[in-house]
């Protein structure tokens, strides 16, 4: 398994552990040089959004992956975590609808959660 996909699986599991909602994984390798994958998730309130981000950081850290930068943690309406190969976006529901990253990055390939085991 490649490093990017290992990071995706770990981040997805960490978000799910904290009851992340509507988790999307977008393969942007053929669309952008920013990263290989975007992971987008929603939380119901700022405490949950921060808990989801904390769990992602902890679980990826256990595997030796270091977050390059975190933006938006204090306000917790959109937190961006840059891991180089993957970028994790955790939103509150209102801001996720407003920014609609899935529409902006629609040229990327959406990966079904069921397909994570086969990659």
Image (tube, rainbow, N blue to C red):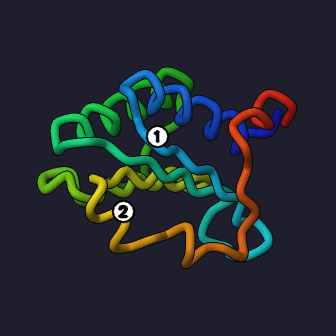
Quick one: label 1 or label 2, which is nearer the N terminus?
1
Pointer 1 and pointer 2: residues touching (CB < 8 Å)?
no
Residue 16 in the image: state x and y as whole percent. 47, 28
Q: In the image, is residue 56 above or below residue 63?
A: below
Residue 84 in the image: state x and y as whole percent. 56, 56
User: What residue sits 29% from the left and 65% below the top?
Assistant: 95
Judged from the image, the secondary structure of the residue bearing numbered disc 2 is: helix
User: What residue sits 58% from the left and 29% below the top?
Assistant: 10
Q: In the image, is residue 96 above or below residue 49?
A: below
Name the foreground residue: 82 vs 31. 31
Horizontal arrangement in the rendering, residue 6 relative to residue 97 (left or right): right
Q: Which mark is residue 96?
A: 2
Residue 116 in the image: state x and y as whole percent. 75, 34
Name the foreground residue: 43 vs 31. 43
Spatial CA distance of label 1 from label 2 is 25 Å
Report the residue that reaches farthest toward the right.
Answer: 118
Judged from the image, the secondary structure of the residue bearing numbered disc 1 is: loop
User: What residue sits 33% from the left and 54% below the top?
Assistant: 91
Q: Which residue is mark 1?
A: 66
Q: In the image, is residue 113 above or below residue 40?
A: above
Q: Quadrant of residue 44?
A: top left
């Amino acid at each position: 398994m490649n490093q990017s996909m290992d990071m995706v699986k770990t981040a997805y599991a960490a978000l799910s552990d904290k009851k992340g909602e509507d988790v999307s994984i977008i393969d942007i390798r053929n669309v952008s040089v920013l990263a290989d994958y975007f992971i987008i998730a929603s939380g119901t309130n700022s405490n949950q959004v921060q808990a989801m981000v904390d769990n992602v950081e902890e679980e990826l850290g256990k595997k030796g992956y270091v977050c390059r930068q975190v933006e938006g943690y204090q306000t917790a309406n959109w937190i961006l975590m840059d891991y180089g190969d993957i970028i994790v976006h955790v939103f509150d529901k209102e801001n996720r609808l407003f920014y609609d990253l899935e529409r902006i990055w629609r040229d990327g390939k959406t990966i079904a959660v069921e397909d994570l085991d086969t990659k």
